[in-house]
Amino acid sequence: MRNEKFKTPNTFNKTALFLSTALAGAVLTGPALAGQPVGTRVQKLEATIIELQRELDAVKQDQAAAAAKPAAELPVIFKGGPSIEAADKSWSFKVRGRIEADAAFYNNKSGPIDYNSGTELRRARLGVEGKVFTDWQYRLEADFADASTDTGGNEIDVKDAFIAYSGIKNTKITLGQHKTPNSLSQLTSSSDLLLTERPLAVEAFNHRVTAGGDYKPGASISYAGQNYTLTGGIFGANFAQTGFSGNDESWGPAARVTFAPVNEKTAVLHLGASGYWRDTGGNGNVRFRSGPEVSTTDANRLVDTGNLSAESYSSGGLELAGIYGPLYAQAEYLVASVDRSGGLANADFDGGYVTLSYALTGESRNYKNGIFSRVKPANPFSLKSGGAGAWEIAARYSTINLNDGAVLGGEEDNYAASVNWYPNDYLRIGVDYVYFDANRAGVNNEGSAVVSRVGVVW
């Protein structure tokens, strides 16, 4: 109705304009034709009116064609969820999310920790992201699953909450809560992991609340070259970490560098190094701990240093990974050091892992800006077309040592294998087998678990 109201006066105005022009033409040409016979003057005036009427008819036809043409629609793209983008790409808006549900079954062989079998909503994330004025990006995402929270309550756990500027070539400046640039496995999205959980040392040294990595508020700048990346920033404490026992909020720098001397679609060689240093805010604490690489664990940890009073602490790691067709390999070695307060001796810990995977259906994992992501099925699952989706197998060995001097956090070795099925780009169904063997202060915990996960990401 609103368009019709505007069209009617517009047509009337243009018609009136032409009629006025015709009348003005007749008046103006009158004196010029005054010396001619009446018949001649009438013929010329009639010819002028006919020409003006022809032009008026052409205008009416153009208006009718414009009215019949459908209005340009705002493009809406569905990539698992709705994504809207301006035609000139100056702004965009996307709804993003992730749901992962687990079921774990334990066989406790020995030790005082008796893990209970059960189910768990591991992640239930919902958020938005996009860009404005071409060079500015934003993202806000929170997790509603109780399994992801840090205090055991039912609060919403904020993950990403940042704005970023990318108006400088190959450069991105980010302000707000986002992942610190530490560890290849930690920076890999949970939806792209080969197994359901991250390796022991990665979890222990990069926990977002008890240690120095993962999601933290801060400012960072990253540069991505053709086959290398450089990232650095200053970060505070995770938004979920409230109250600092009279101390200042912990803070510190973090950085990562990667280099890919081979960087092709189905052949990649990746080298990387990262690290962070943290000030605890004055006689604060740090804690390194890890479970059996299965989330459904009743919150028990097999290795745990407990709270270590510290003035500062640091962690660093080396990365090696590669793609060769459907074959993928990834390994990291990580260390952590605690500068303890109160005259206590410093403590040093380490750990690492090696992972191998193979895509049975021939796809390769993807690589961009120093991060690997999941395989995308060449033939998505379909009963009509016969597509099988993508099938992948993986195996991993991981280890951690949290013993040093008087600190007896324990040692643990894990062996794991998985089978993953990707029906399409958004769904993943996987089954892991994990064997864990931990010893802490002379007490051994040994057992195994089978865990399944159904996940969707958009």
Image: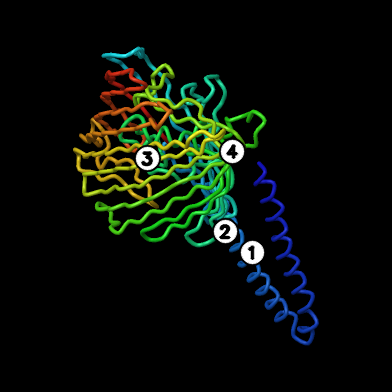
Which is more foreground, mark 3 or mark 4? 4
Label 3 Cα crowd, 10 Å radius (few <14 / some 14-19 / many 20+): many
Helix, strand or loop at disc 4?
loop
The image quadrant that residue 341 belongs to is top right
| Measured Cα–Cα span from mark 3 to mark 4 | 24 Å
**Mark 1 is on which residue type?**
Leu
Q: Is residue 453 left or right of 150 when viewed as pictured? A: left
Task: Say which mark, if any, is on residue 305.
Answer: none
Helix, strand or loop at disc 1?
helix
Residue lying at 67% horizontally and 30% vertically, measured from the top left: 246
Helix, strand or loop at disc 3?
helix
| Measured Cα–Cα span from mark 1 to mark 4 | 75 Å
Task: Say which mark, if any, is on residue 185.
Answer: 3
Residue 301 screen position, x and y as percent: 40, 22
Asked whether disc 3 touches disc 2, contact meaning CB atoms under 8 Å apart, the reply is: no
Mark 1 highlights which residue? 56
Mark 2 highlights which residue? 61
* Mark before the other along the chain sequence, 3 or 4: 3
**Mark 4 is on which residue type?**
Ser
Residue lying at 68% horizontally and 70% vertically, measured from the top left: 49
Judge whether 324 appears above or below 354 on screen: below
